[in-house]
Image: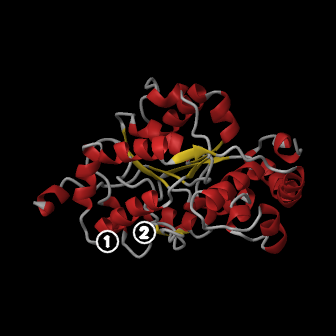
């Protein structure tokens, strides 16, 4: 039975990849994509295929790294239908080798990224890893002073990370969006993005008028960790069909609702002026390089609020 179901999977090619950045609205975009009848995403939001650094570690376990698989495995993560197929994986921007791997596998693919003010992005990731996953226990200022190349901060060096993509792909294959644009006018944002992907631009995502998720922390961290463990175990055992069946039955959606309603509380932490000033100093040179790369005025990113 499993072999029969697997025959339905196996795309001829993949049409797009969102490369990040992390904590920049990619979950919101994934939700909109899943509601579009002409777009297909894999069962897992992030496949960690094009990044050798895909073994994203939390205290509760690992996201599965699939960099050792071949491109045919990657194609089998998608149904063989007429939809535009692609993946949203925030690690591909951070891993400087991902651009070459994507280009080698799919030279005609379209790439897009969503960039958030790196200061706010770093603070958002810090809150997640300090208060939700438990991965980080130091203060943000300690990280800035003791480990300036820490992933929490280094993920915001967008100019350096985009450079390989600009060398690998043509201008009409690569689109850089700003998180600010998505928040200010989500309708215009998705109109442009759907056009870039090549799907019906008249479709309005149901989530369009909903607020993007506010940062939250888990009251009981073992619940999401247990869910991740079960999913990873099923994937490792080759039982992806069970995951797909559970997804079709809405089990994953119900678990998310339960987790959001009963196991998460909003995080209302504010960045201190000293933290914001230190991060602004750290990012200012890269922001100035980014302005030249994407031809956008980012002065509002360089001035502390």
The mark found on residue 236 in the picture is: 1
How crowded is the residue under tag 1: few (<14 C-alpha within 10 Å), some, or many (20+)? few
1 or 2: tag closer to the N-terminus: 2
Q: Are marks 1 and 2 in contact (CB under 8 Å)?
A: yes
Say how many tags the image has.
2
Q: Secondary structure at mark 2?
A: loop
Residue shown at 45%/57% (left/top)? 224
Label 1 – label 2 distance at C-alpha: 8 Å
Q: Quadrant location of the C terminus?
A: top right
Q: Quadrant of residue 175?
A: top right
The colour scheme used to paint the residues is secondary structure
Q: Secondary structure at mark 1?
A: helix
Q: Position of residue 292 (x, y in %)?
A: 80, 49
Q: Residue furthest left?
A: 1
Do we see residue 288 in this rendering?
A: yes
Q: Which residue is mark 2?
A: 64
Q: Position of residue 212 (x, y in %)?
A: 58, 36
Q: Position of residue 68 (x, y in %)?
A: 41, 76
Residue shown at 42%/68% (left/top)? 64
């Amino acid at each position: 039975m499993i072999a029969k179901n697997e025959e339905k999977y196996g795309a001829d090619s993949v049409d797009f990849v969102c490369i990040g950045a992390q904590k920049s609205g990619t979950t919101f975009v994934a939700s909109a994509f899943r509601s579009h009848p002409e777009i297909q995403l894999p069962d897992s939001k992030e496949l960690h295929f094009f990044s050798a650094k895909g073994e994203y570690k939390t205290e509760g376990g690992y996201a599965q790294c699939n960099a050792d698989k071949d491109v045919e495995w990657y194609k089998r993560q998608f149904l063989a239908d007429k939809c535009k197929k692609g993946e949203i994986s925030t690690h591909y921007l951070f891993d400087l080798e991902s651009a070459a791997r994507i280009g080698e596998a799919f030279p005609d693919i379209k790439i897009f990224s969503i960039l958030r003010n790196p200061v706010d992005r770093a603070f958002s990731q810090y809150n997640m890893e300090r208060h939700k996953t438990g991965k980080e226990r130091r203060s943000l200022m300690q990280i800035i002073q003791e480990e300036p190349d820490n992933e929490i901060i280094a993920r915001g060096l967008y100019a350096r990370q985009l450079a390989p993509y600009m060398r690998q792909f043509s201008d009409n294959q690569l689109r850089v969006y700003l998180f600010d644009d998505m928040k200010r006018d989500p309708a215009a944002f998705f109109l442009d993005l759907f056009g870039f992907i090549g799907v019906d631009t008249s479709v309005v995502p149901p989530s369009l008028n909903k607020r993007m998720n506010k940062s939250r922390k888990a009251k009981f961290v073992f619940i999401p960790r247990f869910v991740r463990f079960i999913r990873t175990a099923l994937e490792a055992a080759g039982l992806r069909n069970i995951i797909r069946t559970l997804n079709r039955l809405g089990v994953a959606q119900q678990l998310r609702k339960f987790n959001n309603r009963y196991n998460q509380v909003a995080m209302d932490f504010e960045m201190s002026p000293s933290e914001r000033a230190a991060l602004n100093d750290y990012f200012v040179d890269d922001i100035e390089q980014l302005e030249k790369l994407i031809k956008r005025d980012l002065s509002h990113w360089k001035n502390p609020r």
